[in-house]
Amino acid sequence: MNALDILQLLSPELILALTGFVVVSVDLAMRRRDEGRTAATIALLGLGGALVATLLLAFAGTSTVEAFTLAIDPYSLFFKALAIVSVGLVILASISFMRGKSRYLGEYYALLVFAALAISLAVSATNLVMVYLGIEFLSITSYILASYFRQDLRSQEAGVKYFLYGAVAGAVMLYGISLLYGATGSVDLATVGALFSAEGDQRLLGIAAIILLLAGFGFKASLVPFHQWAPDTYEGAPTPITAFLSTASKAAGFAVAGRVFMVALPNLVADWTAILGSLAILSMTLGNLVALKQTNLKRLLAYSSIAQAGYIVLGLAALNPGGDFDGVGGLLIYLLAYLFTNIGAFLVVMAIEQHSGSVDLAAYNGLIKRAPALALWMTLFLLSLAGIPPLAGFFGKFFVFAAVVERNLLTLAAIAAVNAVVAAFYYLNIVRAMFFVESEEQKPVSVAAGLSAALAISGIMVLVIGIAAQPFITWISRSVEMVLVSGM
Amino acid sequence: MAQQALFLIMAVFTLGMALGTVTSRNIFHSALFLVGSFAGVAVIYFLLEAEFVGVAQIIIYIGAIATLIIFAIMLSRSVTGQNGSPMNRQWAFAALGAALLFAALAWLFSRVDFGSTAQPVPEDAIALIGAGLVTEYVIPFEVASILLLVALVGAILIARERHS
């Protein structure tokens, strides 16, 4: 492998890093303040370039290349594309939403680009050192972004809670890493996987390591019992950042957990799937039950996202290499569908927040009369979150549930099905407010151009993935094959 | 034997200092306890023949970070006043949880044999670390510097905007 090959393989990361530096420098050099518009434009161009580079690598049929503690394989390229698209949509929506709310918008966009870089590195990591560094990089960037409104106490609370919780979760994860290193003398995932046996007392050590590692991964993915930060942070953070935390950042947690468990602990697969299965039950049930009582949309979507994390992790819990539904494929499809659906829902929340300054359910009353387009988009996203066919969210649930059934985990399947029904209740409750509750306010809602564009992209993707799912499923099964073959 | 005794002494010292850090009512005292804890960890690194990490611990943690923490405390609040108790209502539960976790891990480590993987420390360990940082670990090394840049930008943002 020569230098040029390496540069090409790392092109998404290099473009993202360069974009981040350019955004910071240009913003610094500019004398005239333009509310971050230049910074946002450069960031979007850079993200576009990085997305093209990622897709080129993905469709050039790149086989797995491992170099310098990173793996460039279809699995990591899939998550990189996901992260870049998610950050792009968040930036697009932020242009109007953040205007006038902070004096330092150049840094805001740069930090978002660096967050995409952090996710790209974390999902490619083949080495526990890089895993930790990637997650920590993402965390530190997210703490700053969550507390971006300096004058707003809730935003400060969001940042501080996220930081304190994340610092502890990171330390616990590091302890788990040290156990794996202590047992095998290596930090390379594949070497750990080859040396770590599941016999006798080493199995106990492995289970301890799994639980400790899960503190870090579960924190990112907001799985119960590592979820306590999520409602307050989601509520207090600037809404575009909430959208980011609930999609790209969450996906990174699942991606890293999937690779570490599949590659480093294949001999303990029975143990970690069982642990993940119980976390899935806890997350789905707690998330949905608490969501039922929420009237603040950001909090409601926070608990909904905890419940969704429970469905998503079912994919790993029902890991079934060689089966018709291998589980990991379901995880990836779910995350792809969830990305557009959940960002879309938060985009509507942003539009309403910008218009009325409120994130309460009451602000959505009679939305169909005041802003028919917004109300229809929101309905689409909520139905997709509930998993109604033929929308994207349906395929996510279908593939994950199918893997659970194929593995014969019928209790798990039953609990998941009951939860899906409970969840539909509070999702449809919002639809009811938008369509059937009269509102006192009659002023039509105007939506800024960037936000509309992001909304249209998300909405169309939810429809496209739902109606023409085949190409996405083919791409994903190819991504999964590689990881399963190398890991299992 | 002497090494083991020294380890035990240093471990108790480090833990005592750490406990002082989290329980002290005066934040300035907490910072001083923290320096002691850093020093204890550095000695443990030397005992493990990890000289490079030990030296880095002294230069970076004691030399730079601790100084920075003390400066930050002195610049941001009066050293004597405003010292609330660091305890809240949940301290007993937290202590219980920590004790249980410790018991579980201690039980685990008493059963698992780590000995087989211990290797002798190479003579030129520092040279190996240096070579590692520019070969296999070059990307983590570079990423760490970007991470620090981001943290720096964030720290300035958080510290500054309040005055606007």
Image (tube, rainbow, N blue to C red):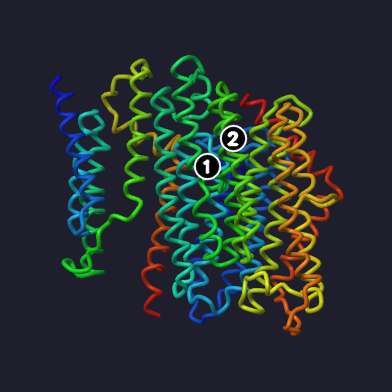
Which quadrant of the view contains residue A342? bottom right
Q: Residue at x 52, y 44 (%)?
A: A225
* Tag of residue A217: 1
A352 or A228, which is in the foreground? A228
- Measured from the top left, where is residue A192 in percent x and y? 49, 25
Q: Is residue A103 above or below residue B151?
A: below
Q: Is residue A94 visible?
A: yes
Foreground pick, A481 / A24: A481
The amino acid type found where label 2 is placed reads Leu
Q: Residues within 10 Å of mark 2 (few under 14, many from 20)?
A: many
For label 2, the residue is A276
Determine if residue A20 is in view.
no
Q: Residue furthest left?
A: B2
Name which of mark 1 and mark 2 comes first in the sequence. Answer: 1
Badge 1, how many Cα within 10 Å: few under 14, some, many 20+? Answer: many
Looking at the picture, which amino acid does disc 1 mark?
Answer: Phe
Q: Nearer the viewer, residue A185 or B35?
A: B35
Quarter holding the C terminus of chain A is top right
Q: Which quarter of the figure is the N terminus of chain A placed in?
A: top right
Q: Quadrant of residue A327?
A: top right
Q: CA distance from mark 1 to mark 2?
A: 11 Å
